[in-house]
Amino acid sequence: MKSKILLAGACTGILLPAFDTGATEQGAIAYPIGVNTVVSGIVPEPGETWFQSFSTYYTSNNFADGDGDSLIPGFKASVSANASKLFHTWDGVTLGPFSISSAFAVPFFNINTTNAITGEEHDFSLGDVTVSPAYFGWSNPEHTFFAYAGMDFVIPTKTKVSNNFYSISPIVSMTWFPTQELELDLTGVAEFHTQNDETGYRSGTLLMADWAVLYHLAPSVPKLALGLNGYIIKQVSDDTIKGAIVGDGFRQQGFAIGPQVTYAFEGGGGIAVKWQHEFGNKYATRGDKVWMQVTIPIGGKPE
């Protein structure tokens, strides 16, 4: 029996193992849960392009069952991953008060897993890519509230780490500065999956939220912000194989929280480092994730 890792396709996310016999895709997820905690509602200026790099290292010693206990004997996983993303806002293209942006992300994964059934395995491969044709962005006149909404389409690459199904995710992302020092970030995602034609498996619908509460050290160190970040994930429909429910539905859930540090660069862009400790997980891995995220403007704003 061959083991397989099912990974967040858009950037770098929670890492979810499954097995090719029986329920192949238990715990599968496409959205990179936990990624959108850094000024998450802000898009590039019209005519501007961002290059974004997302790096993460994830470790887990537990794949939890429906009671939160260990489901897979001897399970261990360590995964390092990086995703590159281009994020562009179109100049002169609007829909009323809304700007229009597009994005494209490509991830790579280096995966090591161990369990008592199949032993040790290693994979390095391209993950599923994410295409975001249109995000509709808006900010208030005071520039204290920013938001965008759109759709993410995750396309399977059919590699060893691919989910081997398509995902469609409506997404809404917001950033609010109620004061000069305080930053609140929230991203909500619903994720819908097609059936894996090779296995007949279809993963249930997911609802997810990334969040962050940050304090900017203005005016002493105005470019530095410290705070907390985390996420919530809840599956709201059952996993199925050829229409039949898998076990009790294999509905996953999970939570994470941890510290975050961000620093803004002169001229735009910045870097963020954060840790996310998972807890309360069911039908999913439970572990710890460290991120480094970098944004660099590569296409100038119009004068």
Image (spheres, rainbow, N blue to C red):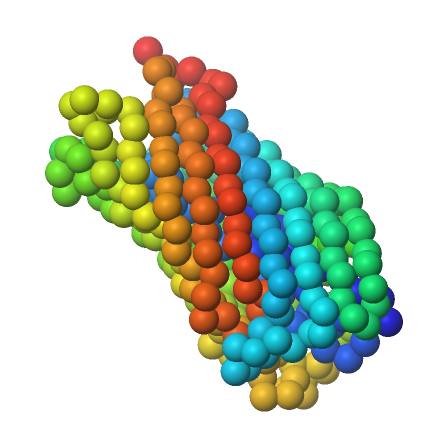
Snapshot quadrant of residue 77: bottom right
User: Is residue 128 found left or right of 114 in the rendered image?
Assistant: left
Identify the residue shown where x is 24% and y is 23%.
221
Residue 115: % across, % down: 76, 67
> Considering the image in quadrants, where does the N terminus appear?
bottom right
Residue 293: % across, % down: 48, 35
Residue 244: % across, % down: 67, 88
Residue 110: % across, % down: 72, 45
Q: Is residue 300 visible?
A: yes
User: Is residue 140 found left or right of 283 in the rendered image?
Assistant: left
Identify the residue shown where x is 57% and y is 38%.
55
Q: Residue furthest top?
A: 303
Q: Nearer the viewer, residue 286 or 100?
A: 286
Identify the residue shown where x is 47% and y is 61%.
278
Q: Nearer the viewer, residue 178 or 89?
A: 178
Identify the residue shown where x is 63% and y is 63%.
61
145 vs 51: above or below: below
> Considering the image in quadrants, where does the C terminus appear?
top left
